[in-house]
Amino acid sequence: MQIAIIQGHPDPNGAHYAHALAEAYGAAARDAGREVRVIAVAGLEFPWLRTREDFESGAVAPAIRRAQHTLEWANHLLIIFPLWHGTMPALLKAFFEQTFRPGFSMAHGGAGAAPKRLLKGKSARIVVTMGVPALLYRWYFGAYGVKSLERSILGWSGIAPIRTNFIGSIDDHDAERRRRWLERLRRWGGQGR
């Protein structure tokens, strides 16, 4: 199995819990004999899309082209990011807009036809850290910011199944709770899911 880890934390210093989670998953996956490549979004240079023409037919930045090659190569994606204002950080959203463009993630099916989903056969796990309790975000707010990633970006491209995990009240976690979450990520990495 070939796994692409999308590290979506916008801070490039690598000292956040989201980085530790991704590293635990990746190390366990490698130990289990899986190939792993990491896309650290905070370290990529690419412009933001500003027009429909850019989205549909604009030039693709070299960093985005490399990310697309990694995603084509992978069978499974692990996407990790912190929840900011109820959704993913703006830099991560800009990355998905640039990467999951027509011709890469989907192809127009013609007049009245559904688009062709070009990333079928891949699976994904989304792990989101947040300051609010996970149940509050999931049930009261409906996890709206993550549902857009699941449905409008990954699902629309044909990626399935998609598993999602919320790690809530992150600022209140003691060392034991953090250790348990790291162990879960290690287990999932070892299983390739």
Image (tube, rainbow, N blue to C red):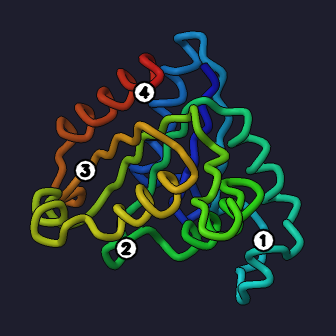
Label 1 crowd (10 A; few <14 / some 14-19 / many >=20): some
Quick check: 123 left or right of 135? Answer: right
Residue 193: assigned label? 4
Residue shown at 77% from the left, 58% from the top: 103
Residue 167: assigned label? 3
Mark before the other along the chain sequence, 2 or 3: 2
Mark before the other along the chain sequence, 1 or 2: 1
Of discs 4 and 3, which sits in the foreground? 4
Mark before the other along the chain sequence, 2 or 4: 2
Give the residue type at disc 2. Answer: Trp
Q: Disc 2 marks which residue?
A: 84
Q: Say which quadrant the C terminus sits in.
A: top left
Image location (x, y in percent) of residue 16: 44, 54
CA–CA distance between discs 1 and 2?
Answer: 21 Å
Q: Disc 1 marks which residue?
A: 46
Vertical relation: 119 (above or below) 41: above
CA–CA distance between discs 4 and 1?
Answer: 29 Å
